[in-house]
Amino acid sequence: MRLTEKDITRITRKVLNENRGSLSSVKDEYRTVSQKLARSMEEYDALSRKGEYKRMGDELDNLRRLIRKLKDVLQNIESKL
């Protein structure tokens, strides 16, 4: 079976539309994780100023988790480009 120009155009449009949709959702995920990370950093800073070391440890764990999540999201974006 041979592909016509019309077939190639249709397939190309479909792939581009799928990629555009998936990039949009990844962009939203990036924004959400980035905002959570920024809030967590602010919370860690506030706890540090208050000397609340136990809670700082908990927040540090949260920061590490969010950083790992952000790395995953960035790798996902890179794979889609």
Image (spheres, rainbow, N blue to C red):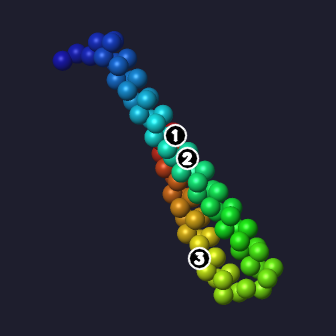
Q: Residues within 10 Å of mark 1 (few under 14, many from 20)?
A: few
Query: Given the image, on which type of amino acid does mark 3 rest?
Result: Asp
Could you say where residue 5 lies in the image, as x and y percent from the top left?
33, 12
Q: Quadrant of the N terminus?
A: top left
Which mark is first along the chain, 3 or 1?
1
Label 1 residue SS: helix
Q: Are marks 1 and 2 in contact (CB under 8 Å)?
A: yes
Q: Is residue 56 above or below residue 26?
A: below
Label 2 residue SS: helix
Q: Which residue is mark 2?
A: 28
Which quadrant of the figure has residue 55?
bottom right
Q: Is residue 80 left or right of residue 49?
A: left
Q: CA distance from mark 3 to mark 2?
A: 23 Å
Q: Residues within 10 Å of mark 3 (few under 14, many from 20)?
A: few
- Observer-nearest of 3 and 24: 24
Query: Given the image, on which type of amino acid does mark 1 rest?
Result: Ser
Query: Given the image, on which type of amino acid does mark 2 rest?
Result: Asp
